[in-house]
Image (tube, helix red, strand yellow):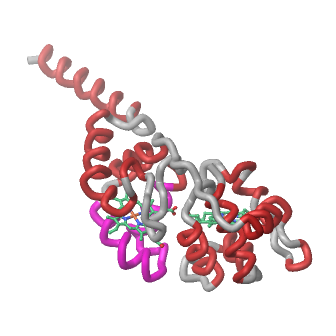
């Protein structure tokens, strides 16, 4: 009996060690389950491996897992608001467990982003200037300061390169009018003019 108890204790300790070790890793089961959800559900809108084809639906391929997980948590908590977030993503995120959110974020982060698409050359050049230098006269900071060279982002600063211009433009408007309520991006976007938003969105979409 004593031996049995010791064995049970040892096995329990081993299991505990494995679970805590797996907290930042993601279990093989969770990875498989996330891949299944991504292919069967999310791909309907976000495209195969998150390379979205429809401009209303953001590309997720190659986005930073930390940012993706934070957004899924924000949809789940219903704090990322605007009619499209509410209409499309609150319901999608509601049933996702924390583990599933981490695994989905890891899945999309590991996919190769699609190449960007060209647009109006004049708008792209103007957008490149705003991205690199901001608009000093209007108090708009350089986007590159946070989103990085090539707009590939880091951790909580999302990748913007190759994202659909229509989606980017809508987010900038939502930050401006606080429907997507994020203080740092509200500060950036509050004085951006419509033509400046269009230019920077065209530039970002053109990047690969
Ligand atoms: C019916 C269409 C639809 C489905 C299915 C869907 N999404 Fe979305 N998703 C959207 C739309 C639309 C947005 C943009 C919302 C906005 O404009 O604020 C979005 C936004 C997102 C974002 C934010 C991206 C960013 O760059 O900030 C993430 C992350 C996301 N979805 C993940 C998922 C995951 C994971 C699934 C599957 C569980 C999923 N979506 C299923 C329509 C969909
Ligand atoms: C001080 C840092 C900072 C600067 C400068 C900055 N951003 Fe951001 N940006 C952020 C953060 C942080 C987020 C993520 C917000 C969130 O958590 O929802 C973000 C999100 C975004 C998004 C949403 C991306 C998505 O996938 O939904 C867009 C679009 C964006 N920024 C564009 C810009 C543009 C254009 C500029 C320059 C005019 C800029 N940003 C300057 C910090 C910054």
Q: Quadrant of residue 171?
A: bottom right
Ligand 1 placement by image quarter: bottom left
Looking at the image, which is closer to me, 116 or 173?
116
Question: Is residue 72 found left or right of 113 in the rendered image?
Answer: left
Looking at the image, which is closer to me, 9 or 112?
112
Q: Is residue 68 above or below residue 173?
A: above
Residue in the picture at 48% in, 80% down: 82
Q: Quadrant of residue 88?
A: bottom left
Q: Residue furthest left?
A: 1
Residue 184: percent from left, percent from top:
69, 70
Residue 177: percent from left, percent from top:
62, 85
Residue in the picture at 32% in, 39% down: 31
Q: Is residue 15 visible?
A: yes
Q: Residue furthest top?
A: 3
Looking at the image, which is closer to me, 105 or 12?
105
Residue 93: percent from left, percent from top:
34, 64
For the magenta stretch, what is the residue range?
68-95
Is 94 magenta? The answer is yes
Residue 172: percent from left, percent from top:
63, 75
Decide whether the magenta segment is chiefly helix, strand or loop. Answer: helix
Residue in the picture at 73% in, 80% down: 195
Q: Quadrant of residue 3?
A: top left
Residue in the picture at 31% in, 55% down: 97
Q: Residue furthest bottom?
A: 177
Q: Is residue 153 visible?
A: no
> Can you say which quadrant of the picture contains the N terminus?
top left
Is 189 magenta? The answer is no
Q: Is residue 22 above or below residue 127?
A: above
Question: Is residue 188 found left or right of 205 in the rendered image?
Answer: right
């Amino acid at each position: 009996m004593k031996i049995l108890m010791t064995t049970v204790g040892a096995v329990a300790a081993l299991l505990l060690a494995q679970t805590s070790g797996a907290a930042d890793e993601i279990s093989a089961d969770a990875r498989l389950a996330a891949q299944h959800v991504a292919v069967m559900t999310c791909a309907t809108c976000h495209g195969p491996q998150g390379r979205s084809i429809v401009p209303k639906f953001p590309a997720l391929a190659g986005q930073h897992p930390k940012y993706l997980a934070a957004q899924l948590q924000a949809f789940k908590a219903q704090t990322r608001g605007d009619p499209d977030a509410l209409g499309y993503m609150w319901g999608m995120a509601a049933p996702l467990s924390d583990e599933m959110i981490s695994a989905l974020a890891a899945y999309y982060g590991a996919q190769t982003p699609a190449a960007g698409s060209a647009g109006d050359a004049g708008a792209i050049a103007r957008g490149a200037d705003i991205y690199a230098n901001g608009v000093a006269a209007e108090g708009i900071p350089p986007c590159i300061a946070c989103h990085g060279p090539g707009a590939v982002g880091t951790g909580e600063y999302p990748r913007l390169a190759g994202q659909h211009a229509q989606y980017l433009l809508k987010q900038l408007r939502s930050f401006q009018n606080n429907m997507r309520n994020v203080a740092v991006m509200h500060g950036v976007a509050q004085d951006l003019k419509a033509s400046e938003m269009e230019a920077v969105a065209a530039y970002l979409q053109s990047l690969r």
